[in-house]
Image (tube, grey):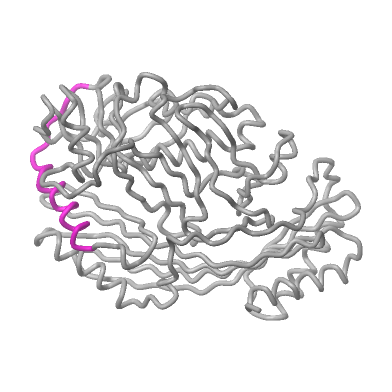
Amino acid sequence: MTVEVELAGSALDRATAALPGAEIEISVDRNRLALTRFANSVIHQNVAEDITSVSIQIHHDGRTAATAATVTGDIDLVALVGRAVDAVRMAPVDPAWPGLAPPADMPSEASGWALDGATATPADRAQVVRGFVDGARGLETAGYCRTNLWNGAFVNTAGQSAHGAAFECGLSGIARRDGADGLARHAPLTLAGLDGPALGRRAAAKALASAEPVELPPGRYEVVLEPTAVADVLETLAVAGFNGKAVNEQRSFVRLGERQLDEAITLVDDPLAVGQTFDDQGTPRRTLTLVDSGTVLALTHDRRSAAEAGAESTGHAGAGAAVWGPFARHLTLAAAPGGPAATEVDGPAADSSVADLVAGVERGLLVSDLWYTRLLDPRTLAVTGLTRNGLWLIEDGQVTTPLRNFRFTQSYAQALMPGNVLAVGTAVSPVPGDTYTATSPRWSCPALRLASWNFTGGASG
């Protein structure tokens, strides 16, 4: 029995003793997050935390309350249970309570991931950083390498119980020359899969190809979005598009059963890839196809949004779901079938898969990264933001001229609508999400060639 299982059982015993007959669920999460940062090509910070948090949700006498806290011992646990009990007694009536997750078998852990993070040391992360710096060919570098090992347990008064472990890692770095930045990001399933030298070479090639950029007039351009840019599109689709709460509240463009995206688009959420087998409500997770060849097949739900929609939870309950809704955090855009594996190429294109898409463009832009993006209209998925870390003109299938950054205003839903997706890359690249949170998203993306993207002006205004 793990420490997390024991802690979950103890919390449940205390809560049921305080409120006999109440519906109670307990979730315990231990995250060992480590982050190695570097700037000016030197590691300047290594931070690590080992935090165990306990979340309690109680439904009693028609009322629901939830609370959570970091727990280091019995005193913290007693105080947390006391706060939860006091809160549910004062909570408003909750007529939409969906009930607790019933007993269910957990999926077996996927074979692709590995717990090499359990023994990862600062020296291991430093070795990855060293490789990135060396691969950048003497250019100034900055970025981070992170690992997180999660152990968790769940139990409720309906008889459901679960425990598991998961590991995630990632590197994000830039190389710089004369104010021009080149970017590389990667989030493989194992720390050993982080190829620092290759990522450093990729970032350096982009920086070297970005010298003396010129300015183009705003307008609509054909684009090739590299995986690091496509990641922002996937995150927005996950949070504001296929989110069951957003659809229930009519804040989303998504309509189940309709072909809303190009037939080249297939979206699959796969939390099992990193080992996450159950959500914060104890619902088993599974691989979930949201879009198949452009047709919307499913939404992401927790128990509450599912009850409102007359559906079943898809195992997407998580921290903040009451506010943000249940959304996919391990979304994959399927690559084009039948192509060869991508290999490194010289120049600004990240790999041969990107270069193949560039080769089909008569005149357009190669976009490395999207930044400072903000949602303007959730119902159309209109987003404004900036390009950064590499932008180039494509002419007759060749990357020719570095460009100054653009501001854009573009509906991500329209960008993927039927007819606008001209091609999808043949290789998927996993890209890390947020740097600092333990449960960082992971977006697996090929490059995309799109017929039109709306650039509204220069980055300066």
Res 389 → quadrant: top left
Residue closer to the observer: 333 or 7: 333
Quarter of the image with the C terminus is top left
From the top left corner, tell me how far across and down residue 329 is, in percent. Answer: 50, 49
Image position of 286 with respect to 452: above or below: below
For the point 8% across and 39% down, which residue is it? Answer: 212
For the point 56% across and 29% down, which residue is it? Answer: 252
- Left or right? Give the position of 84 relative to 271: right
Residue closer to the observer: 315 or 339: 339
In magenta, the rendered stretch is 196-217
Res 103 → quadrant: bottom right
Count the labels in the image. Answer: 0
Is 208 covered by the magenta stretch? yes
Residue closer to the observer: 215 or 186: 186
From the top left corner, tell me how far across and down residue 142 is, in percent. Answer: 24, 60
- Left or right? Give the position of 76 relative to 450: right
Residue closer to the observer: 92 or 396: 396
